[in-house]
Image: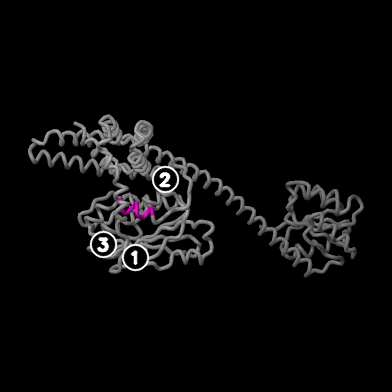
Amino acid sequence: MIEKILVVDDSCDNVDLISQILNRHGFEVLTADGGQVGLKLAIKEIPDLILLDIIMPDIDGFEVCTQLKSLDKTREIPIIFMTALNDISNKVTGFNLGAVDYITKPIQHEETLVRIRTHLTLQKLKKAIQESNKNLLIQHHELAAKNEELKNKNDQLDAFSYMVAHDLKNPLHLMIGMTDVVLKRHPELEQQSIEHLQSVVRTGHQMFEIIESLLLLARIGQQEIECAPLEMEVIVQQAKERLSCLFHQMDGQLHKATDFPIAIGYAPWVIEIWVNYLSNALKYGGHPPCITIGADLQNDNKIRFWVRDNGKGLTEEEKLKLFSPFTRLTDAIDTEGHGLGLAIVKRIAKKLGGDIGVESSLGEGSLFYFTLPPQKHQLNQEVIRLSASTNFQIITDPPQQTITRSQGWKNYKPLFKPAFAIAFHERVMLGDIEGILKFGEHLEECAPELSEVTNHIKTLANNMQIRQLRQLADYYLSSVN
């Protein structure tokens, strides 16, 4: 495309000379012998560049420049002033009005061509950048709209999953509860029938765990939480207690390699991370499982908590798939699962401002980790390193007085009235967490002597520990004739 240059000068000799030079080098030349004519021609033709004389009889070059820069269609045209004036103030005035350059008379051919080509190239680049920015802005708006649409769909999917899973709980609890009743009231049934009913109860519990995982997965995306400093020692102990049967069954040992610095997070969710990591280490670790836990400081100042097992390790392909929903390791022996655990861990860590990952090589076991922000006063790296100093020890069961206290509710069985036991059992079988919490408040008012039981019930309900609630409800109901 031939580039178009407008020459505005009241000197015919200058116009002819410049036109000859530009025509020889392949430019299309438009000419005007005064400011008014030049202004009209520029508006009509929109040249690629304007060579503009300053001193002209009708209106001077400064006025022409001012008017061109005031119009949208001519504002971006580069203007080079031509002047015989050596006055610095005139040159500064030209630049202030929007000119890109100036050349002095008499015209120097090579200099004039170099300046013209330079500013034409700059103008092309400027237009290309503007066009690119325009396209990027359009793409940004389109991407933002798609992201918002995707977010809305994800929110709807989470809400739908939560609703479906929640609605499945009541009939499932009823099925498990009624099957339990049949087993307890009809011991005369044939052994095969009893085994079938027990299979129904086991399968019901597995379904319930899947539903609870789906509900937790949906809640993580929807629930607004308030993060606080974490007592990680207590959280790990609670996670170990929840897995006490599995630890006993697998003959697993848990070792702590370091102390735990104080991180910021949401305790009920962080417990779920430890439960998932520890249960996987028990299921897929060595025989017997030997598990080591600890913490260290990362370069980004986040605290990394980790669980190392003595299993066979993972391939690169397995590591890539590991944190996707419904993904399971297929070679576990006598283990059951639904493949949601690590997906839940990933979503929790992201929601809490951290990350997850695994380090593993075949034959060397695996180290699963999650990161959390540190408490603000611990931002000094040396403080965190000291907190996470080597302090290797075996984590055993809590001292005897702790066990007695945590199971002290068994001592209150004679005080737990039948009406309490029936109402409590009914709410637990329905999976009505809100109803269980209200029952706890009612029990606190009616029977203050059962405060330890009340606190235990509230703790289990707030942590969604349904299996322990069911064990407690069955225990108290067993005293009812």
The residue that mark 1 highlights is: 393
Q: Position of residue 226 (x, y in %)?
A: 48, 46
Secondary structure that dominates the magenta span: helix
Q: Position of residue 444 (x, y in %)?
A: 37, 34
Q: Secondary structure at mark 3?
A: loop
Label 3 to label 2: alpha-carbon separation: 30 Å
Q: Earlier in the sequence, mark 1 or mark 3?
A: 3
Which quarter of the figure is the N terminus placed in? bottom right
Residue 85 in the image: above or below residue 211: below
Label 2 to label 1: alpha-carbon separation: 33 Å
Task: Let me know if residue 168 appears in the view.
Answer: no
For the record, the magenta segment spans 234-241
Name which quarter of the figure residue 441 lies in.
Answer: top left
- Residue 236 in magenta stretch: yes
The residue that mark 2 highlights is: 220
In this view, the residue in front, 267 or 80, is 267
In this view, the residue in front, 318 or 476, is 476
Task: Let me know if residue 420 appears in the view.
Answer: yes
